[in-house]
Amino acid sequence: MDCLCDLDKKDIENKLEAIKKLVDKPRFICVKCARAANKEDLVCKPVSIKPIDDSP
Ligand SMILES: [Zn+2]
């Protein structure tokens, strides 16, 4: 799996199940493409989203 930002529509359809697992708990968002992903190397310009936890 390459950078999610490089996927075109056809790739997304073909790999949807794999992609779902890469974005189910997103920690990073791409400031260029607005895609979110669990790992920073999955998007081209990652910026950390606030850590997901249950505390207030
Ligand atoms: Zn990107």
Image (cartoon, rainbow, N blue to C red):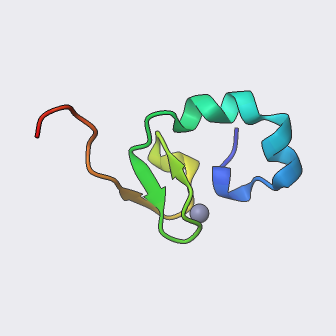
Residue furthest left as drawn: 56
**54 or 16: nearer the viewer:** 54
Of 42 and 49, nearer the camera is 49
Q: How many marks?
A: 0
Q: Quadrant of the N terminus?
A: top right
Q: Position of residue 29 (x, y in %)?
A: 46, 57
Q: Quadrant of residue 51?
A: top left
The answer to whether residue 13 is left or right of residue 25 is right
**Residue 25 percent across, percent down from the top left:** 43, 35
Q: Residue at x 46, y 39 (%)?
A: 38
Furthest toward the front, the residue is 56
| Quadrant field for ligand 1 | bottom right
Residue 26 lies in what quarter of the image?
top left
Q: Is residue 49 left or right of residue 14?
A: left
Residue at 47% across / 41% down in the picture?
39
Residue at point 69%, 45% (across, down): 2
Percent x, y for residue 8?
81, 56
- In the rendered structure, the answer to whether residue 25 lies left or right of residue 41 reads left
**Quarter location, residue 6:** bottom right
| Outermost residue, bottom side | 32
Up-down relation of residue 46 to residue 3 (above or below): below
Q: Quadrant of the C terminus?
A: top left
Residue 14 image position (x, y, % from top left): 85, 36
